[in-house]
Amino acid sequence: MKYDIGSMVKTRGREWIVLPESSEDFLLLKSLGGSDLEVAGVYVGPGGEGVSSASFSLPQATSFSDASSARLLRDAAKLAIRSGAGPFRSLARLGVEPRPYQLVPLLMALRLTPVRLLIADDVGIGKTVEAALIARELLDRGEIGRLAVLCPPHLAEQWQAELRSKFGIDATPVLPTTVKRLERQCRVGESIFERFKHVIVSLDFVKTDRWRDDFLRKAPELVIVDEAHTCAEGSEGRSKRHQRYRLLEGLAADPERNLILVTATPHSGKEDAFRSLLKLLNPEFASLPLDLSGQQNERARAQLARHLVQRKRADVRSYMDAQTPFPERSDAETTYTLHPEYARLFGDVLAYARESVQDTGEALNRQRIRWWAALGLLRALASSPAAAAETLSNRATLADEQDVGLIDSLGQDLVYDPAEDEGQTLDTTPGTQTESEASEDTRRLLEFAARAEALRGGKDAKLGKLTGIVKDLLASGHHPIVFCRFIATAEYVAQALRSGLDGVEVRAVTGRLSPEEREAVVADLATAERRILVATDCLSEGINLQQDFSAVIHYDLPWNPTRLEQREGRVDRYGQPSKAVKVVTLYGADNRIDRIILEVLVRKHRTIRGTLGLSVPAPDEVENVLDLVFQKVLLGENRESMMTPLFELPESHDLELRWQEAANREMRSRSRFAQRSINPEEVAQELAATRAALGDTLAVERFVLDTLKLAGVTVTARNGRYEIERPGLPELRDLFGNGLRVRFDDVQERGTVTLGRNSALVEGLASFVLGQALDDQEGSLAKRAGVIRTAGVSTQTTLLLLRHRFHLNGRKGNRTWQTLAEELDPVAFRGSPAEPQWLSAEEVRALFDLQPDSNLPAPVKQQRLEGVLGGFGALQPHLLERTEDRARELLEAHERVRGAARGLGATYALEAPTPPDVLGLYLFLPQPVGGRS
């Protein structure tokens, strides 16, 4: 026998709901009052288990409670729904409550078939949530079955954790370190990308010839590309970018592929690279004019706006009357003056560096090796005595290279901070020695190394200044992160702070640690009341640190402004519990290298950010400009050329002009593509309807506290959090353990669990209350029936808790899909079932807040319930009509938000194959005249 999706069956001694994944011989069933975890598979083919049709029974007149059951059962039933019937199907399954502005990319996506979207919101706004929300929605609508996330390898674990904890998507990382294990789980001839439903794939792993074609053949219907700017193809044609772009071109070539590109820096300073990304969304975008202003380009702007969302914080801080609490950031610069011995060493090393790079008698490759060795040495010396001693004592990384082009490419990666580091942050010192160990040159370097070692501690003014800064930050309640360029510096600084500060936990995280070890160290450090994290740029991306740290100190100036934003973005983002974050930039007043970076890069970057309210990447020419500026320093023929103010150098001036031009373009772009065309009222309307149907944050708080109160659990409120003591009921102890501290708002606190609608604890509690009521257990917290006498009604009023089950059917071409949707619908009428007077939605809501004003004997309650239940058949036509009307309303809402589907060959239908379940029936009786019963 074939059972329809959503129908009720009985097997194994209980009732179940048939789920969409069922077939004629195999039923996937969900417990009638249980959670999505309470699912069973039943074979019903030849020799299988016995299954029979069942129907949902009405409440019993012999089992009743008071009005509190109505509200508790309503909230439990709402919060137990995981397949909501509204147009935003995914909101019933999320482990996070999206901010209203984060629904805008979702609305855009639902108007595109296929989904081709570039999400380019500012750092810290929540692009991961926005992209994953679209994925969850398409999965829940049945439009896709599989997902792939392409990202740098160091972000794979973060994506895996976010997808699992917030979106209920269990994705498998496919990385060089996991691929062998995954291949062993595949059948003969089966691809990894077939075996695993949802995958997170390293971009640089899958772009190789070995894996690219296999992925293109088996790629899922939806691909999300994180850090998409690293895949853009510019005129420079770097091989890694070229391979990545070829991969994305292959994915985009499938006209039905859904593709979401995610990046905070879509331009990266180059217009042609930006255009290459747009071409992946629509090939026609390759011919868009460079300047989109003017009435003649209005159509082009409108076309691009359907695919591009690009907002800064000011655009979303206040959206739809919802305030998003981004922290206020204050920036400070602090200087130090080198100790006389450190200054002498700096001068001697600079003279040596100038001498070594001015020797033009060597082969070109040797000249370039010396150039990069000299710059690396100066950078290490500016960092710390430890980094200087280490690089002076070691052989230069490039010492044995022959190819000039490769030397310069590797040198830039070793010495500068490339905007994209392929996920492999280079935080080791580059080494300086280029000659044999017995050479005079090596002897001089080792003498410098010994002098550098002698500067540790008391003669290191930079370290002394840092100690004062962190003391001040700790005293003001901040938890700082100290960012360093080199491992040697980070370990040296951490040890010094550990020795010099009492009662403060200090830990160093560097590239010596694996990503898993880094997370473990940070998590352990976060438990300390007073804490300092010292890190290299291996932590400037990936792990979000805003919950546990609130200040950033740039101990070493990054040589690319993008690093500034990446570092500061670890704490300056949504979810930061502190109202203010502090950023301190430390530099040497008499340190020529620091002054170059500060004046050429850092201050210009901050000026643009302060003026426009957004960060703009430095133009790609920045490394060439730095080369030219350093040549002035190292190749200048006299002291005057070295002392020329940096802002007067032509190269610096040209860079500033190009940077300002890029900033103006970015501002125009963000103004055009902030998606102000998405009507906030439209978002508000759909969001309000969905939250009303599924239960919002206030409903969660009310339900949890009401349930615990009825269960006799002691709960103490303190400053927005609740201390829950050990419950007496075993079922509640399984959820709350021996006690728990919880919150229901956006404030993040260490040791406090934030409970949202889709938290496992809330889902478990809702299933417990609902299951008790449906099984009519003795002592259940909620009953399906109740009677109270109240002054809040003037005539007998009956409240019904209805649960509708719908089929949402989709078709595109030869492909069809069907999903199950549920919705709770409280309705009420005055008078008898034979002549009901139906109440408005507002009047129905008011019934849940009524309290009893006098008691009624149990026999009277039972008699009144029997009277309504006996005439219930007269209500059925109206309830069926209501279900059908609701199905039409919901279909209109679905078509409204999925506006592009019908025009591109996709159609939807929503049907109600069964009458609504009557979860609860509650009578409100008026007070008798004179107050007598």
Image: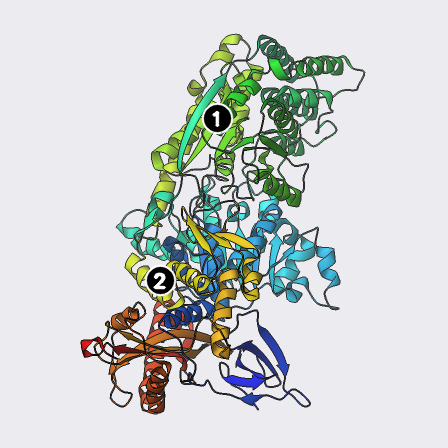
Quadrant in the rendering for residue 342: top right
- Residue drawn at x 73%, y 57% is 181
The residue sitting at 57% across, 37% down in the picture is: 528
Q: Earlier in the sequence, mark 1 or mark 2?
A: 1
Q: What residue is disc 1 on?
A: 585
Q: Under tag 1, what secondary structure?
A: strand
Task: Return the residue nearer the eye: 83 or 400.
Answer: 83
Q: Give the structural element (helix, strand or loop) at label 2.
A: helix
Q: Residue 664's spot in the image, x, y percent?
A: 36, 38
Q: Amino acid at mark 2?
A: Leu
- Disc 2 crowd rating (10 Å Cα; few below 14, some 14-19, many 20+) is some
Q: Which mark is residue 687?
A: 2
- Is there any visible trace of residue 751 in the rendered image? yes
Quarter of the figure with the N terminus: bottom right
Q: Quadrant of the image for the C terminus?
A: bottom left
Q: Amino acid at mark 1?
A: Thr
Image vertical order of residue 549 relative to residue 779, above or below: above
**Number of the front mark, 1 or 2:** 2
